[in-house]
Image: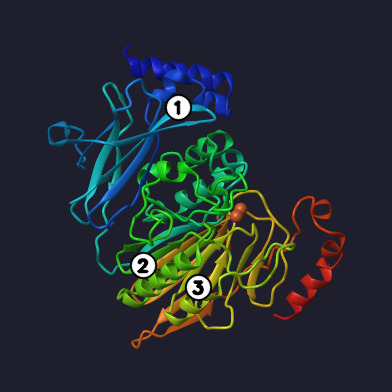
């Protein structure tokens, strides 16, 4: 029996003793030595590169990736290449961890690769990833709002349903607040990655940081917690000081732009950020632009100011024909336009923590007390957006088509189900009396407007 067999046996025994408990997954020093929290992301071009990151508590901090062009034959050991990972360590509240990452470059486009990570006799299973084609062709990606709380217990079911329904999705986009406390592993990152399980090893993640990924010590700078950069490898093509937070990724014919809407910027840094944003919006020659940041363009939770949060960003996304702005933070669902034909602003929530909504005038479709995910299907001239409940039922949907001149046209899908506008659990206790008392009247006014 080798070390790996002992680990697996230990895991099995522990799992039987404490089913579903975090202790079963992490309090076993032998199990922790196995590479885990393995996930794909992009630091450079999706057509020619793939970033992979993972974590260990191994005795030796060194970790490696082995990879090769995938074959149906399992006898591919002779073609395997090996590369040492870049390793950092962090002592967090649950001890010292090693965080490893590799950016595989010079890969062939439209090619499936097999890879595993580890060291000596402690290796992960082999998994596959596929490089982008770089061509204009239909594909799907997934968009999730805040997962944040009760991640393993309830958040996991949204990721699971989304991936089961879309096994060929090219990436999963998380609009911030993936977890509740960005500086902590327990109940946070220790739940988030197992919530997606092997899907993270197979489908790359694009994530924009939320306020909860930033330091939670009332610091005025709202600096990002170190675990963000240790967990993910994102591009470093953004403004200075915001690498891996504010960045863009071009996947085939679309550009996805992530803006860190939490970090405190000086006047100078703000200007640099907006200049950068304008430049990358203006220069893009592909078909569709999606901008993602965490804080919805306007407050929607019933006790938050409903005013526009980022007028400079709003002006730019309207000027440069951004198709959609994908956000979270409000813990409600909303979709609408804000005084211009485009972009379409979407606000969603994947996890179980829910807020009560305020029925702002710009909302064209709202939803509350639901876990949701979104499928976004893009082709050269058409974008089809479908928001689905955690049970896979269509909740919202529309299509944007482009004519020969490149003008976009929005058409809402017909026969959508009635809106779910149930106020959140403990509504009366959580909100001021006035906000509770006016809810029904506001809701009826909103529904009448339609
Ligand atoms: Fe948030
Ligand atoms: Fe949140």
3D distance between C-alphas at marks 1 and 3 = 40 Å
Dot 3 corresponds to which residue? 313
Dot 1 corresponds to which residue? 96
Residue 334 in sight: yes
Q: In which quarter of the image is ligand 1?
A: bottom right
In the image, residue 18 above or below residue 338? above
The residue lying furthest to the top in this view is: 1
Report crowding for label 2: few under 14, some 14 to 19, many 20 or more residues within 10 A (C-alpha).
many
In the image, residue 309 above or below residue 128? below
Q: Position of residue 225 (x, y in %)?
A: 50, 44
| In front of the other: 303 or 169 | 303
Dot 2 corresponds to which residue? 255
Q: Where does the N terminus fall, quadrant-wise?
A: top left
Q: Is mark 1 on a helix, strand or loop?
A: strand
Do labels 2 and 3 touch, CB within 8 Å?
no
Q: How is the image coloured?
A: rainbow
Q: Where is residue 119 in the image (x, y as percent from the top left)?
A: 28, 26
Q: Is mark 2 on a helix, strand or loop?
A: strand
61 relative position to 296: left or right: left
Do labels 1 and 3 touch, CB within 8 Å?
no
3D distance between C-alphas at marks 2 and 1 = 37 Å
**Image quarter of residue 282:** bottom left
Report crowding for label 3: few under 14, some 14 to 19, many 20 or more residues within 10 A (C-alpha).
some
Q: Where does the C terminus fall, quadrant-wise?
A: bottom right
């Amino acid at each position: 029996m080798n070390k790996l067999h002992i680990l697996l046996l230990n895991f099995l025994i522990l799992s039987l003793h404490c089913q579903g408990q975090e202790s079963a997954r992490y309090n076993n020093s032998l199990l922790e030595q196995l590479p885990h929290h393995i996930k794909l992301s992009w630091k450079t071009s999706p057509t020619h590169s793939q970033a992979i990151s993972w974590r260990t508590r191994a005795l030796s901090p060194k970790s490696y990736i082995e990879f090769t062009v995938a074959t149906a034959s399992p006898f591919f050991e002779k073609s395997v290449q090996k590369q040492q990972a870049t390793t950092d360590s962090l002592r967090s509240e649950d001890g010292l961890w090693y965080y490893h990452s590799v950016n595989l470059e010079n890969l062939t486009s439209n090619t499936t690769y097999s890879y595993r990570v580890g060291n000596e006799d402690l290796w992960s299973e082999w998994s596959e990833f596929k490089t982008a084609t770089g061509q204009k062709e239909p594909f799907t990606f997934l968009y999730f709002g805040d997962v944040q709380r009760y991640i393993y217990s309830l958040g996991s079911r949204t990721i699971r349903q989304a991936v089961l329904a879309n096994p060929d999705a090219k990436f999963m986009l998380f609009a911030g607040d993936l977890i509740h406390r960005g500086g902590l592993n327990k109940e946070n990152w220790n739940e988030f990655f197992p919530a997606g399980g092997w899907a993270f090893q197979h489908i790359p993640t694009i994530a924009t940081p939320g306020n909860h990924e930033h330091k939670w010590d009332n610091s005025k700078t709202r600096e990002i917690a170190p675990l963000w950069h240790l967990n993910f490898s994102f591009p470093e093509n953004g403004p200075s000081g915001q690498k891996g937070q504010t960045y863009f990724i071009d996947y085939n014919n679309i550009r996805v732009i992530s803006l860190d809407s939490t970090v405190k910027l000086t006047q100078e840094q703000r200007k640099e950020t907006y200049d950068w944003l304008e430049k990358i919006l203006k220069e893009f020659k592909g078909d569709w632009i999606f901008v993602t940041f965490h804080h919805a363009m306007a407050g929607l939770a019933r006790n938050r100011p409903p005013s526009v949060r980022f007028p400079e960003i709003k002006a730019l996304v309207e000027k440069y024909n951004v198709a959609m702005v994908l956000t979270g933070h409000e813990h409600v669902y909303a979709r609408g336009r804000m005084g211009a034909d485009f972009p379409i602003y979407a606000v969603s929530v994947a996890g179980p923590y829910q807020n009560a909504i305020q029925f702002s005038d710009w909302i064209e479709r709202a939803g509350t007390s639901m876990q949701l995910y979104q499928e976004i299907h893009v082709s050269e001239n058409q974008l089809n957006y479908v928001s689905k409940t955690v049970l896979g039922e269509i909740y919202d949907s529309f299509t944007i088509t482009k004519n020969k001149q490149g003008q976009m046209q929005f058409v809402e899908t017909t026969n959508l189900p009635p809106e779910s506008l149930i106020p959140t659990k403990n509504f009366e206790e959580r909100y001021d009396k006035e906000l509770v008392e006016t809810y029904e009247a506001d809701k009826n006014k909103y529904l009448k407007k339609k």
